[in-house]
């Protein structure tokens, strides 16, 4: 019997993301990912503890595709850049993107995106005891729009209309954040 190919967690996660992009999220099974990597399903458990861990890893890949804006930018610009980055990810991975509404960020790498949002909200003046709640509401609104857009629910609207709607949503959310902090938006 030959040696198993060398592979790491990133290889396993990438294989899962590629499968989901090509065949939908339901196609992501331990067996299918193992086949893509060229190993037995049991060999995957050296890199991912379970299917849940694999799915958490897909959330990680999606969130780490978003470039984190410079910390010195105003909070509105940082959150706007993150939202725009998420939109690009949604367009690249429409079959996988809804996972962000179904699974929380739990891995160290995926939590960096949440931490960046928390820092921007703190800079906006949101009281520390309200930051988690404000982030949940803002991210859920953004993700909901993006899942609707990427999933085709809004496909009958021209791109310009969707761009305008996305901008209006961000303006509404900036106003909400400002109301939570006592600051004025823009």
Image: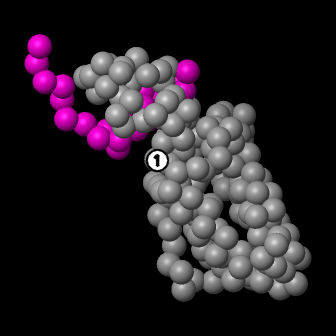
For the C terminus, the image quarter is bottom right
The N terminus lies in which quarter of the figure?
Answer: top left
Q: Is residue 106 above or below residue 125?
A: above
Residue 82, percent across and down? Answer: 58, 64
Q: Quadrant of residue 94?
A: top right
Relative to 181, say whether 134 is above or below: above
Q: Compare residues 127 and 88 and report the one nearer the observer.
A: 127
Residue at image location 82% in from the left, 72% down from the top: 129
Give percent across and percent down for residue 90.
Answer: 56, 45
Q: Residues within 10 Å of mark 1 (few under 14, many from 20)?
A: some
Residue 129 in magenta stretch = no
Residue lying at 40% horizontally and 17% vertically, measured from the top left: 31
Q: Is residue 164 left or right of residue 28?
A: right
Compare residues 38 and 179 and report the one nearer the observer: 38
Position of residue 79 measured from the top left corner of the image (x, y, whole percent): 64, 69
Q: What's the residue at 31%, 25% (across, down)?
A: 43
Q: Please give left or right for residue 31 compared with residue 184 in the image.
A: left
Q: Secondary structure at mark 1?
A: helix
Tell me if I can see residue 3 in this picture: yes
At 18% from the left and 25% from the top, the residue drawn is 4
Left or right side of 113 for 67: left
Check the image and name the residue furthest to the top: 1
Magenta highlight on residue 9: yes
Start-end of magenta stretch: 1-26
Protein image colouring: one colour
Task: State the residue position of label 1.
Answer: 61
């Amino acid at each position: 019997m030959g040696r198993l190919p060398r592979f790491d967690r990133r290889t396993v996660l990438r294989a899962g993301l590629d499968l989901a992009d090509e065949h939908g999220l339901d196609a992501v099974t331990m067996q299918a990912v193992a086949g893509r990597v060229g190993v037995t399903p049991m060999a995957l458990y050296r890199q991912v503890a379970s299917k849940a861990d694999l799915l958490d890893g897909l959330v990680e890949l999606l969130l780490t595709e978003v470039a984190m804006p410079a910390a010195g930018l105003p909070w509105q610009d940082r959150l706007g850049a993150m939202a725009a980055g998420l939109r690009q990810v949604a367009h690249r991975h429409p079959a996988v993107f809804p996972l962000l509404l179904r699974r929380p960020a739990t891995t160290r790498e995926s939590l960096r995106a949440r931490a960046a949002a928390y820092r921007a909200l703190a800079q906006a003046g949101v009281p520390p005891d309200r930051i988690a709640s404000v982030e949940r509401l803002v991210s859920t609104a953004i993700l909901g729009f993006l899942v609707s857009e990427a999933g085709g629910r809004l496909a009958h609207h021209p791109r310009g209309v969707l761009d305008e709607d996305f901008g209006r949503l961000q303006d509404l959310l900036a106003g909400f954040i400002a109301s939570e902090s006592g600051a004025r938006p823009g």
